[in-house]
Image (cartoon, coloured by chain):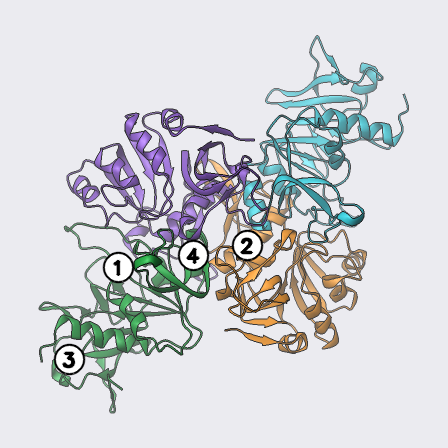
Chain colours: A orange, B purple, C cyan, D green
Amino acid sequence: MKKIISAADAGKMIPNGSTVMIGGFLHCGSPNKIIDEMITQNIHDLTLIANDTCVPDCDRGKLIVNKRVKKAIVSHIGTNPETGRQFVNGEIEVEFVPMGTLVERIRAGGAGLGGILTPTGIGTVVEQGKQTIEIDGKKYLLEKPLKADFAIVYGTKVDKYGNVYLENSTKNFNTVMATAAKTVIVEAEELVEDCLDANHITIPGIYIDYIVA
Amino acid sequence: MKKIISAADAGKMIPNGSTVMIGGFLHCGSPNKIIDEMITQNIHDLTLIANDTCVPDCDRGKLIVNKRVKKAIVSHIGTNPETGRQFVNGEIEVEFVPMGTLVERIRAGGAGLGGILTPTGIGTVVEQGKQTIEIDGKKYLLEKPLKADFAIVYGTKVDKYGNVYLENSTKNFNTVMATAAKTVIVEAEELVEDCLDANHITIPGIYIDYIVA
Amino acid sequence: MELSKEQIREIIARRVAKELHEGDYVTLGIGLPTETANYIPKEMHVMIQSENGLIGVGAKAKGDNICRTSINAGGIPVTTKKGAVFFDTATSFSMIRGGHVDVTVLGALQVDQEGNIANWMVPGAFVPGMGGAMDLVVGAKKVIVAMEHMAKDQIKILKKCTLPLTAAHEVDLIVTERCILRVTDEGLVLEEINPLFSLEDITSTIEADLIIPDSMQNIAA
Amino acid sequence: MELSKEQIREIIARRVAKELHEGDYVTLGIGLPTETANYIPKEMHVMIQSENGLIGVGAKAKGDNICRTSINAGGIPVTTKKGAVFFDTATSFSMIRGGHVDVTVLGALQVDQEGNIANWMVPGAFVPGMGGAMDLVVGAKKVIVAMEHMAKDQIKILKKCTLPLTAAHEVDLIVTERCILRVTDEGLVLEEINPLFSLEDITSTIEADLIIPDSMQNIAA
């Protein structure tokens, strides 16, 4: 049985300066209530690991607009002009990672692997400063695993064992992020009374520490 | 729409000397009808990639007993004394791979990665002849991806789009193997009339070439 | 010959659609490439993959149909076709990087005769990030660049890209409103021209060395 | 002191079970380690993970209950507990290697004072393969070796393993029917003894250097 807490409790749990993974792909499948509490609790100096910074008025985008993020590790910021403005003005550091590399680095972090060997980025600026390894005549980039202090993920349905079902496109980055952080908090759209079907679980409860419901 | 063929057609498709991945964990979730046809069609000199060689009278075990396998890449052969006998007598070559490394190498093969960096096997005989890479002070073994000419996998329910649902413990190696071979054949326990639920699919049809039903 | 933006986009999207085959799995970039889907014949079974984690993208969702948890990579709510599958983004890029997607269609700022593509970054300008483009170009079996022939007066088909690359040596086909170019080991082959343009209109607006065969098809064919 | 095989197994399994805590996820090796599950208090919520791809392993399936697609890593049909999850073997080992399993309990042929373990191979003898043992030992947060104190007359707790290793420096606790040994940076600490045995019975059957504290608990405590 996992601890069930409020969004406010979750917000209070995160110290300033933490590295936080937040699930979601644009506005889809993001833990909005917890993000709102992170704003309310005045948490700042975050390193944000996410696919994108959404739009200014929406979930992860609010953390940008409210200047809570000192560094963002993302695949793109194109949908949030405010991230672009802060980036151009040197108010935020942005590390761009190809989307497939980003999600695989997070998976590697959660799976105990030392990194990934990917052909993506070879021959581009992404290669700069990184080790390349030739395997059977083909060059690969060694990209390091990503881990975080906290992962804040979304769940369409969650049971008391922490098992999570994610509907449709809400799966996105939530699945791998739940494996790659010291403390993992899932925001349940619905906390189910009984347990979820053992064959229809997107994130096994072993990865979950707290349920916000 | 995927081609629906008979088990005999599938058997005939596999040339002697092929590298074949076969799904299943012991007797659970293995494509038995296709294996029987591989025996009938007299296919030999196979390189078998599988978790294990099951027991002598059962699925993958039959390929061993009938001497169709010249090399097995597996995590263990403890349940099949005939594999052990052939191995001791030099009639079969066996490459032992730690189970987690085996399944991850197959995944890497299917995911376009150059290999995996795993801590498993460091300081053991598994390390012999392989490159080690130190990342942030910890040693990892570079293990190469595995690919095959054919993957023969099991499906509890399969739709005409090749989407596969695997029940309970039948998921095992079937999921990753379906991604890592030139030709992928799924043996359907049940071919469903309508399509499977888009959220309850274990193997997306994109990976499947033929359905045996 | 002056074509409107709409005419240009339609010519390109229509022609790209002809490159797709029965049973193909296709990933389309945001913008012009997405319009390709409008010209796939109804009877042809092509599955569109969206990099966020969906195979079987249908039309944009409208009215009562809108499901906010069913989106494409551009964040647009979409319907799904029969046989659709939802999966996570890790699975999606394993699929893409692993060579399971048959065709990807992407826009470009520049392409060159070596098959290099630059489509994500202009130094000194605002950089939105590469998103999934680098993985798509590296991973897809066939990479089609669908783009307007020129950017205002700037030449985009070069001997060597000057902008930072998205990927090296990965482009297979370039489709513009004026011509079709195939990237081969021998160089860039001019395969089709739009009869609305003269050969001179085309060669004078491409910096790359061109291999021009004796016979050439019309782009509309 | 002569104990029967059954008595030995019960002492070990019962003691290992005391190492488990509310909320733990635990992977048990085949054989003796599996018996640990019989001694977990009913009111304690411990989830057993099976490396083939299952969390929430229950009792062996019997009679009408048998579902042949619900098996543990030994191939035995099992029931599942409330909150169970089935997943594929790739997910299972990402979980194991990634440090998400709290405790693993495994048998051993040899262990040593550096925390090395050998449990898969005897050169010259038939080698069944390592299965998932190497990943489990490397990945689990806590590694407990549960084994008979001696193999016939052979000493198994050594200064340095002589058999090929399963993993180096990974063992945390050794539980035998005679004693409990904790692997620390300083060396092997004798933490508990079974009062059925004298200190001499224990020290004379261990080759490793032992740190013997002034006070020691009984193993039955």
Against C28, residue A37 (above or below) is: below
Q: Which residue is mark 4?
A: D92
Graded by Cα atoms within 10 Å as few (under 14), some (14 to 19) or many (20 or more), the crowding at tag 4 reads many
Q: CA distance from mark 2 to mark 4?
A: 18 Å
Q: CA distance from mark 4 to mark 1?
A: 23 Å
Indicate the chain on which mark 1 is placed.
D
Q: CA distance from mark 4 to mark 3?
A: 39 Å
- Compare residues A29 and B143 and report the one nearer the observer: A29
Q: Secondary structure at mark 4?
A: helix
Q: Which residue is mark 1?
A: D165
Q: Is residue A44 visible?
A: no
**Residue D16 location in percent, x, y?**
29, 75
- Of badges 2 and 4, the one in the foreground is 4
Q: Which residue is mark 3?
A: D203
Indicate the chain on which mark 4 is placed.
D
Q: CA distance from mark 2 to mark 3?
A: 48 Å
**Residue C34 location in percent, x, y?**
74, 37
Q: CA distance from mark 2 to mark 1?
A: 30 Å
- Of badges 4 and 3, the one in the foreground is 4
Q: Secondary structure at mark 1?
A: loop
Q: Are marks 2 and 1 in contact (CB under 8 Å)?
A: no
Q: On the rendered structure, is C34 left or right of D173?
A: right
**Hey, what amino acid is under mark 4?**
Ser
Nearer-N-terminus badge (4/3): 4
The residue located at (33%, 67%) in the rendering is: D170
Nearer-N-terminus badge (4/1): 4
Q: Are marks 2 and 4 in contact (CB under 8 Å)?
A: no
**Hey, what amino acid is under mark 2?**
Arg
**Hey, what amino acid is under mark 1?**
Leu
Graded by Cα atoms within 10 Å as few (under 14), some (14 to 19) or many (20 or more), the crowding at tag 1 reads many
